[in-house]
Image (cartoon, helix red, strand yellow):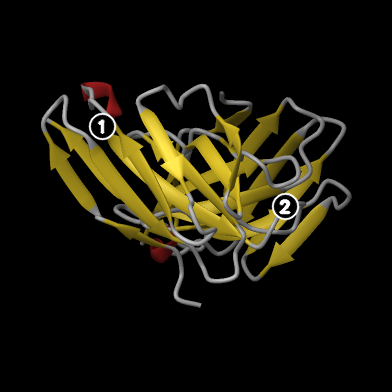
Amino acid sequence: QQQVKQSPQSLIVQKGGISIINCAYENTAFDYFPWYQQFPGKGPALLIAIRPDVSEKKEGRFTISFNKSAKQFSLHIMDSQPGDSATYFCAASYNNNDMRFGAGTRLTVKP
Amino acid sequence: DTGVSQDPRHKITKRGQNVTFRCDPISEHNRLYWYRQTLGQGPEFLTYFQNEAQLEKSRLLSDRFSAERPKGSFSTLEIQRTEQGDSAMYLCASSLGGGGNQPQHFGDGTRLSIL
């Protein structure tokens, strides 16, 4: 069912550094690309999302970069903080029907 | 906005038993989704409702699984004759409708453990 490939599987970043997580998708019909943050024992929480007619979207320290021709998108977390340590999932959907998730990236931000 | 609520949070049962989970979506959200998440993986889509109509079902939703949303508000997911492989976190999400820019908001899930 996975149509979204996410990398890396895990990432360790120093406090204040930039965390970068990448995703690639296959289905060109996808029209909505969100990123979710998940803490242990909790459900995924929407972080930021982008539509394919936009190449970049920034909200605070979080930025999505979108490359439609390459069918790739990435999440950049600027000034990473220990509180950002969590698992991050990229996802994609068409018309907000079934959402396809990547396998997740476990981010650890070291103080 | 009280968020998506799921009950119970944890369920432990013996293999072969039936279990039922409940999801209360954000009020006024007409779409409701069920996902399953196993350890170390992303959520996998099971099914979704638009109001009371079940519009799509994944191949993951075997005959032992059934979901309902009788009045277009809360939903239940039932698993009959549970198997070891059913052990997972069952997540519910809701959204204001179809189309892009309508984010899916997730509850904290029901963790099912099959003994």
Residue named by callout 2: B98
Q: Quadrant of residue A25?
A: top right
Q: Does A91 sit above or below residue A26?
A: below
Mark 1: give few (<14), some (14-19) or many (20+) Cα within 10 Å. Answer: many
Residue A47: x and y, percent?
A: 58, 60
Where in the figure is residue B10, as x and y percent of width and height?
21, 50
Q: What is the secondary structure assignment of the residue under circle 2?
A: loop
Same subunit, labels 1 and 2: the answer reads yes
Give the amino acid at mark 1: Ser
Question: Is the residue under label 2 in contact with that under label 1 (CB below 8 Å)?
Answer: no
Q: Which mark is residue B87?
A: 1
x, y percent for residue B56: 61, 35
Instruction: Say which residue appears at 45% left-offset and 45% top-offset.
Output: B68
Q: Is residue B80 left or right of residue B106?
A: left
Residue positioned most to the front: B70
Question: Distance from label 1 to label 2 (Cα)?
Answer: 30 Å
Judge whether residue A11 can be spotted in this image: no
Taking the image as shown, residue A22 lies to the left or right of residue B98, namely: left
Q: Is residue B80 left or right of residue A59?
A: left
Check the residue under mark 2 and report the chain it is in: B
